[in-house]
Image (cartoon, rainbow, N blue to C red):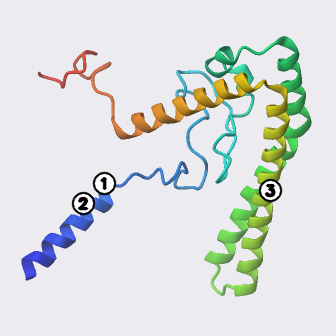
């Protein structure tokens, strides 16, 4: 019986160590992962736009300036101008809300880490985060609606297909580390020394 308990504990420990830290697309600090920075999309810079539950169809900010997404969609010059105007008009509000949310999360952590926390203060700080998330969701929804009205149905479907391919590729990359390459025994997919 003791051996069975030790075996069960070891199995659980191994499973806990092997889990992915990417819990639903968020880093350990709660920031959305993927879609931003260099290297995530073929070495080009990609602006991040956090996506909440239900807005997985939301393309990254300034996606029409990213050739990997924009080229297959085949936007006209007028459409590019319209998308730039939407980003200019509405993008600042979303950035401000994201900054406010960072501060609100910090305030909640301060309340939780205090030596004598007040339940009311913790709840108030949490409710502020919820209100900001709701506001950010509303802003993202407005931007999504505005961007969608600029595109034809065929362009929208092409964009969504491109986004789905990127998500699938990112999931494959997260689950299957690449073998070979520089310093890894060649680029032919062999393990070193094979």
The structure residue drawn at horizontal position 9% and vertical position 82%, both measured from the top left corner, is: 2
Label 1 with label 2: CB-CB less than 8 Å: yes
Tell me: residue 42, above or below residue 34. above
Residue 176 position within the rendered picture, expressed as x and y whole percent measured from the top left: 33, 36
Tell me: residue 160, above or below residue 76. below
Task: Tell me the quadrant of the picture where the N terminus can be found.
Answer: bottom left
Residue that carries the numbered disc 1 in the rendered image: 18
Residue that carries the numbered disc 3 in the rendered image: 100
The structure residue drawn at horizontal position 22% and vertical position 19%, both measured from the top left corner, is: 185
Query: Which of 83 and 192 lies nearest the eye of the viewer?
Result: 83
Secondary structure category for the residue under label 2:
helix
Farthest residue, direction front: 153
Residue 87 position within the rendered picture, expressed as x and y whole percent measured from the top left: 84, 32
Q: Which sits earlier in the primary sequence, circle 1 or circle 3?
A: 1
Tell me: residue 18, above or below residue 172. below
The structure residue drawn at horizontal position 73% and vertical position 79%, both measured from the top left corner, is: 123
Q: CA distance from mark 1 to mark 2?
A: 6 Å
Residue that carries the numbered disc 2 in the rendered image: 14
Answer with the quarter of the image where residue 75 lies. top right
The structure residue drawn at horizontal position 74% and vertical position 66%, both measured from the top left corner, is: 130
Query: Which of 40 and 54 lies nearest the eye of the viewer?
Result: 54
């Amino acid at each position: 019986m003791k051996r069975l308990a030790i075996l069960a504990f070891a199995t659980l420990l191994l499973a806990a160590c092997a889990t992915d830290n990417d819990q639903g697309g968020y880093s350990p600090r709660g920031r959305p992962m993927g879609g931003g920075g260099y290297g995530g999309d073929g070495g080009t810079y990609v602006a991040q736009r956090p996506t909440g539950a239900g807005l997985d169809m939301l393309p990254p900010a300034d996606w029409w300036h990213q050739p990997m997404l924009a080229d297959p969609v085949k936007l006209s010059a007028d459409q590019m101008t319209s998308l730039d105007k939407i980003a200019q008009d509405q993008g600042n509000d979303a950035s401000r809300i994201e900054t406010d949310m960072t501060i609100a999360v910090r305030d909640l952590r301060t309340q939780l880490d205090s030596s004598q926390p007040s339940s009311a203060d913790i709840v108030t700080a949490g409710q502020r985060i919820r209100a900001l998330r709701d506001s950010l969701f509303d802003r993202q929804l407005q931007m999504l609606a505005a961007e969608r009205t600029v595109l034809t149905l065929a362009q929208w479907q092409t964009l969504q297909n491109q986004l789905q391919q990127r998500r699938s590729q990112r999931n494959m990359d997260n689950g299957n580390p690449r073998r070979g390459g520089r310093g890894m025994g060649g680029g032919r997919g062999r393990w070193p020394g094979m």
